[in-house]
Structures are given as C-alpha cells and as structure tokens.
Image (cartoon, grey):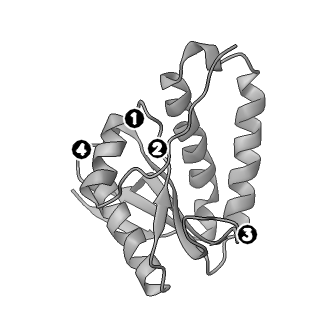
Amino acid sequence: MDIIIRKAIDSDKSFFVDFAVKLSEFNRSKHDQRCKYDDYQLVVTAIQEKAEETFCNRDEETLILIVELNGKPVGYSLGRIYEEDKTADNGTGKTGLFDELFLGKSARGFGLGQRLIDETIKWFKEKGIKRVKLHAYSWNNSAKKLYERNGFSEYAVSYEKFI
C-alpha cells in the first residue's frame, strides 16, 4: 500500500471540492431527520462555492493536505490560522483551527486520519501556534475518540431545540 500525504496543488481543486461535498453528505446522513427541512441541493451548491473560494484563496495561514492511497486521492484535511476575537474570554491571539477532515470509505481504517492530524499539528507548531481548536458533531463518536487520543478535550458544548 502506497500512502502519500502532501500539500494541495492547483490541480487538486476538483478533488478538494468533491471531498468537501462528500463530507457534507456523510454529516447530513447522520443528522436528525428534523434538520433536513431545507433544499439540500442549495446547500451543496453553497458548499461547492465555499470550497472553491477556500481553495483558490489559500495562503500561508491555510493548509490543505491531500492523502493519496496507491496514487489516488482519497481524502483531505483543512487547517487554518485565525485571530481569535478580542472579546474571547477563553483566550485571544493567533489560534489554529483543524477545520475539516475527510476520508473516503475505502481509505478508512489505515491510520490516515491520524497521519493527517499529525501533519497538520506539525504545521501549526512550525507556524508558532500554541492552541488548536476543532469541532465535532455529538453523534460522531469515532471522530471524537480520534481527537481525544490526540490530546483534544471538550471545552464548549452547543445545544439546539426543535420548536
């Protein structure tokens, strides 16, 4: 098995956009049925547009990694550096955001998610980042376990109510 993890290049744009949509489709399939009242095709179009914008505007504070398995792109991760809001009572300044992680079904179970996390954390450290945040849905236990094994801990919880 030949595994390559590399920074995205211009020719990866279509893979990145496609993976962003697949990530959304995966998440959507797990959400409560009551969340699915919208026109999902409009959501997909918006995700495609946002992914294209993210890809085309990547800079020194954005890291897109592509993982290849046997020469074929099978997933990605997205890391960003941002300035925490000055009113954040839990700390301000430059912060890392491990924004997205997706692996196609055929690429799961080989430790590729771990390798993407390792490479992204390494990049944050090289950039002088001392704190990294990420978000995971409460139903995504496998992702939460992966993040916790990597030293991430819960610090904020969101609630919602259907009315």
Element marked by disc 3? loop
Which residue: 56% across, 27% down? 28
Question: Which of 77 and 2 lies nearest the eye of the viewer?
Answer: 77
In this view, 82 is above or below 47: below
In this view, 150 is above or below 159: below
Judged by depth in the image, the label closer to the viewer, 1 or 4, is 1
Asked where in the image residue 144 lies, by quadrant, the reply is: top left
Label 4 crowd (10 A; few <14 / some 14-19 / many >=20): few
The residues tagged by marks 2 and 4 sit, at their Cα atoms, a distance apart of 19 Å
Q: Which mark is residue 57?
A: 3
Q: In the rendering, at what x and y percent does residue 98 appear?
A: 49, 60
Tag 2: amino acid: Ala
Question: Which of 141 and 75 lies nearest the eye of the viewer?
Answer: 141
Element marked by disc 2? loop
The residue that label 2 is drawn on is: 136
Tag 4: amino acid: Gly
Q: Which mark is residue 140?
A: 1
The residue that label 4 is drawn on is: 109
Check the picture and name the quadrant holding the C terminus.
top right
Judged by depth in the image, the label closer to the viewer, 3 or 2, is 2
Label 3 crowd (10 A; few <14 / some 14-19 / many >=20): few
Q: Is residue 107 visible?
A: no
Sooner in the amino-acid sequence: mark 1 or mark 4: 4
Check the picture and name the quadrant holding the N terminus.
bottom left
